[in-house]
Structure formats: structure tokens, C-alpha cells
Amino acid sequence: MRKYIRRLIKYSALFCLLLIGLLIALCMSINAGISHKRIVAQYWFRALLIILNIKLEIKGLNQQSKEYFLVANHISWLDIPVVSACLPVCFLSKSEVGQWPIIGFLARFVGTIFIARGSRRAITKVNEQIEESLLNHQTVCVFPEGTTTSGDRLGAFHPSIFQPAVGIGVKVLPVAIRYLDEKSNPTTKPAYVGNMTLMSSLDRIIIEPIIFAEVTFLKPIDSQGSQRHYIAKVSRDMICSALFE
């Protein structure tokens, strides 16, 4: 019965929030700059977390965290709203997200950079877009694992995605994301893995009474004069330590 009530309340509120998001996006699509759009999106994502009853816990974030190249572990589609609720940011996302109803439109509205998975040619174009965003003093966030996990492990980081940051000497900021249940134990409920659909993943989150999203911004890494393989290893080691030690 409680799960039914949660579904009824949260799905209704989520539908209203999506409509509000569409109206805002349509009103701002002509004249508003990308920075203003991302600030508005930050508050929209905060409202989304409230509806889903996800309590955001932010550690280590300060004003100097802006205009960095953020790299984070990847557990779920929920990672994007969680990080976006912390600060205005440009994301690199799989091309399929751009095709999702409503969500895809909102993702394009905030200037999300899309990449076709499994395409080596795509990475060159994507890196150029990331570099342009960084040169325009925009914070960019990527998930170097290239896929999601259940949160109980950390996959290998692909060094190629670090090339834009290394190429122009932007500082790399590792970000550790983990989800906890109401007893502060790690939970896999938000995980978006395997053949799971977006709706089934969303429903797993909605029926939970509460989820804590812990986002830890770690010490920035100076990429000036470094190799991308080295930066990938250091950032992965830092995130791994924050999550599992």
C-alpha cells in the first residue's frame, strides 16, 4: 500500500515538474545564454530530487570548483541530476539520452554533449566540443568508465576522454558519487545497469522511502604538462579511495 501511495504522489509530481521544465525550456530557448539555462536547470534538478525524496549531501564543493573538468564514477542516470543540483555543469552523455521523450529535449536545452557509444570516430569530435566548452570557462563533467556499475566497484577509466583537459591544461576535479539507504548503508536501488529500462529504474527509485546521494568533490589535479594516462589513473585512484576505503 505504501509503495502504491508513493507511486501515485511521486509520479504525479514528476509529471508536473516535466511540464514546467518544458515550458521553461521553450520560453528560454531563444534569447537565454547557456550559462543562464544551466543555472535554471540546477534548481529544476533540485526540485526533481525533492520529488524523488533523494537527500543530497555535498562534500568539498567550493567556488573554485567552477570551470574544472569533472570526472565521476557512474552508477545511474540519476548521477546527472545529482551532480547538476550541486553546480551548473555541461555533461557528456550517450547519444540515446538525446532520443528519450522530454528528457532528451531538456538535455539538449542545457547543451549536453552527446557521444555514440562504441564509435572511435565520435571521440575526436566530442573532445573538440569539450575543449571548446572548457575554453569558454564552462564546467564539464564526464564519466570516464563509459558505462554504469552497481556502485560496488569502479571500472577502468578511459584515458582518451581526458585529452581535452590535458591538452589545454585545465584542472581535473575527481568526484565520488555513492547512494545510501535510510540506514546509511550503500544501496544499489538507483543503479541503472544491464538491460534495465529507464522506467523500471525510475520505479525502483520512486518506491524507496528515501535515498541519500553523497557527492564528494576531491582535491583538484593539475593536468598541465601531464599525460592523460597518468591523470586517468590518479583520478580513478582518488575516487576509489573515497568510495571504498
Image: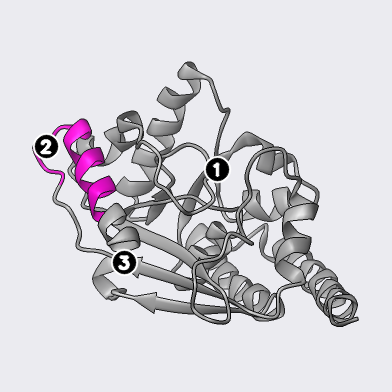
Callout 1 environment at 10 Å: few (<14), some (14 to 19), or many (20+)? many
Q: Which residue is mark 2?
A: 226
Residue 147 appears in the picture as rendered: yes
Q: Position of residue 16 (x, y in %)?
A: 83, 74
* Dot label at residue 93: 1
Q: Position of residue 118 (x, y in %)?
A: 54, 22
**Is label 1 in a helix, a strand or a loop?**
strand
The spot of residue 183 in percent (x, y) is 54, 81
Q: Is residue 67 above or below residue 74?
A: below
Q: Residue at x 58, y 72 (%)?
A: 40
Between marks 2 and 3 in the image, the one whose residue lies nearer the viewer: 3
**Quick one: label 3 or label 1, which is nearer the N terminus?**
1
Residue 164 screen position, x and y as percent: 30, 36
Nearest to N terminus: mark 2 or mark 1: 1
Q: Is the magenta region chiefly helix, strand or loop?
A: helix
In magenta segment, residue 232? yes
Q: What residue is shown with label 3? A: 217
Front-lying residue, 111 or 7: 7
Identify which residue is drawn at 47% across, 36% down.
146
State the quadrant of the N terminus. Answer: bottom right
Q: Residue at x 44, y 72 (%)?
A: 214
In this rendering, position of residue 186 left or right of residue 200? left
